C-alpha cells in the first residue's frame, strides 16, 4: 500500500547540514577510488566507496560524481557506493553526436554486469532519476530499490516550466555553446518520452522525491508517484531542484529510511 511521507519544515531546523567535503577526498576526481570500465564502446568512469550491498548514484544533466559529495560519505557507511559519471559527462567517454536516456541506462546495466552485480539500490537526481526509472523498466532484475529526486518522464510544459524549456532552446541555438552542451540540452528538450502507463511495469519499490520549489512541477511529480505500483512520495519543504545539496542531512536520512524498509 502506498504511503505518503510528510516532511515537516521544523525538521530542517534540527537537521542543519554539516557536510563539509573531506579535504583529502575530491569526489569525482579521486585516483584512489576511481576506475574505468569498457561499456558499450566507451570508457565509463566510476568511483567506489564503503562496503556492503551495492548502491549506484546517478547525477543530473551536465554534472558528475561531484554532485553527490554530500551523499557519498554518508551512504558509504552503510553501502558499497558506486558513483558513476554518465556518458559524455564528467570523466566518462562518449560522442556528442547522439545521446539518450536509454543509452545511459544501458551503460549502467553494462557496468553492473562488468562488476558482476546482479541487483543494486539506485539513487538518481534529475536526469539520474530518469535514468533510474528507465533502468528499472528495461532491466528490472537489476534494481532492488529506487530513489529518485527531481525526475520527469515527459519534456513538455506539463512537467517543466515554459521558461526553463526556453532556456534550454536558447542554449542549443547559441553559437558559443559547445557541441557537448548542445547535445545535453537537446536531449532534455525532446526526451524522455515515457508513457505514464509504462510506470506500472516497475515492480521494485520507488521513492519519488522533489523540492516544493523544484523545477519539476509538483503535479508532474505527484502523477509519477500515482502511476507506480509500489511507491512512496516525499516533497521537501523550502527546497529547490537540488535538495540533496541544499538539505543533505534531511535528504540522506529520508533515503536511508526508505532503503532500510
Image (tube, helix red, strand yellow):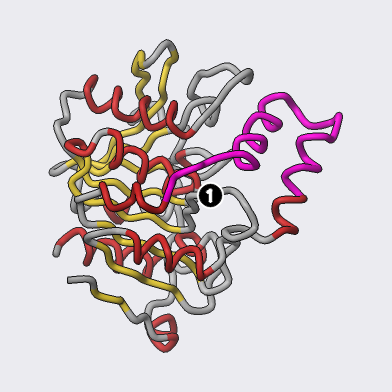
Q: Position of residue 141 (x, y in %)?
A: 17, 37
Determine whether, in the image, residue 259 is placed left or right of residue 74. Answer: left
Determine whether, in the image, residue 259 is placed left or right of residue 236. Answer: left
Q: Position of residue 187 (x, y in %)?
A: 60, 35
Q: Position of residue 156 (x, y in %)?
A: 62, 52
| Number of marks present in the image shown | 1
Q: Main secondary structure of the magenta part?
A: helix
Residue at mark 1: 154
Residue depicted at 22% across the width and 39% down the height = 140
Q: Quadrant of the C terminus?
A: bottom left
Q: Residue furthest bottom?
A: 10
Is 58 contained in the magenta span?
A: no
Residue depicted at 27% across the width and 39% down the height = 49
The answer to whether 232 is drawn above or below residue 135 in the figure is: below
Q: Position of residue 47 (x, y in %)?
A: 35, 32
Determine whether, in the image, residue 31 is placed left or right of residue 257. Answer: right
The answer to whether 213 is drawn above or below residue 43 in the figure is: below
Residue depicted at 20% across the width and 58% down the height = 259
Q: Quadrant of residue 168?
A: top right
Is 185 contained in the magenta span?
A: yes
Q: Quadrant of the N terminus?
A: bottom left
Residue depicted at 59% across the width and 60% down the height = 158
Q: Nearer the viewer, residue 23 or 26?
A: 26
Q: Residue furthest right?
A: 175
Element class at badge 1: loop
Q: Which residues are magenta?
A: 167-195
The answer to whether 48 is drawn above or below residue 128 in the figure is: above
Q: Residue furthest top?
A: 41
Q: Nearer the viewer, residue 27 or 153?
A: 153
Amino acid at each position: 500500500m502506498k504511503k505518503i511521507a510528510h516532511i515537516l519544515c521544523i525538521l530542517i531546523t534540527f537537521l542543519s547540514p554539516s557536510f563539509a567535503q573531506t579535504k583529502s577526498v575530491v569526489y569525482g576526481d579521486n585516483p584512489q577510488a576511481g576506475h574505468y570500465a569498457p561499456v558499450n564502446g566507451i570508457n565509463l568512469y566510476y568511483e567506489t566507496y564503503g562496503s556492503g550491498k551495492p548502491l549506484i548514484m546517478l547525477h543530473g544533466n551536465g554534472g558528475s560524481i561531484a554532485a553527490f559529495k554530500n551523499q557519498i560519505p554518508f551512504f558509504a557507511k552503510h553501502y558499497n557506493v558506486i558513483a558513476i559519471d554518465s556518458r559524455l559527462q564528467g570523466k566518462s567517454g562518449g560522442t556528442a553526436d547522439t545521446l539518450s536516456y536509454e543509452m545511459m541506462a544501458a551503460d549502467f546495466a553494462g557496468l553492473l554486469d562488468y562488476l558482476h552485480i546482479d541487483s543494486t539500490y539506485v539513487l538518481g537526481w534529475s536526469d539520474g532519476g530518469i535514468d533510474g526509472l528507465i533502468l528499472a523498466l528495461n532491466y528490472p532484475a537489476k534494481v532492488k530499490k529506487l530513489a529518485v529526486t527531481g525526475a520527469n518522464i515527459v519534456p513538455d510544459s506539463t512537467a517543466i516550466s515554459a521558461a526553463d524549456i526556453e532556456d534550454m532552446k536558447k542554449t542549443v541555438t547559441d553559437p558559443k555553446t559547445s557541441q557537448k552542451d548542445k547535445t545535453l540540452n537537446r536531449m532534455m528538450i525532446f526526451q524522455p518520452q515515457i508513457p505514464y502507463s509504462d510506470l506500472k511495469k516497475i515492480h521494485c519499490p520507488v521513492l519519488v522525491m522533489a523540492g516544493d520549489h523544484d523545477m519539476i512541477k509538483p503535479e508532474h511529480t505527484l502523477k509519477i508517484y500515482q502511476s507506480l505500483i509500489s511507491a512512496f512520495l516525499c516533497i521537501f519543504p523550502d527546497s529547490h531542484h537540488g535538495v540533496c545539496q541544499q538539505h543533505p542531512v534531511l535528504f540522506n536520512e529520508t533515503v536511508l529510511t526508505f532503503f532500510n524498509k
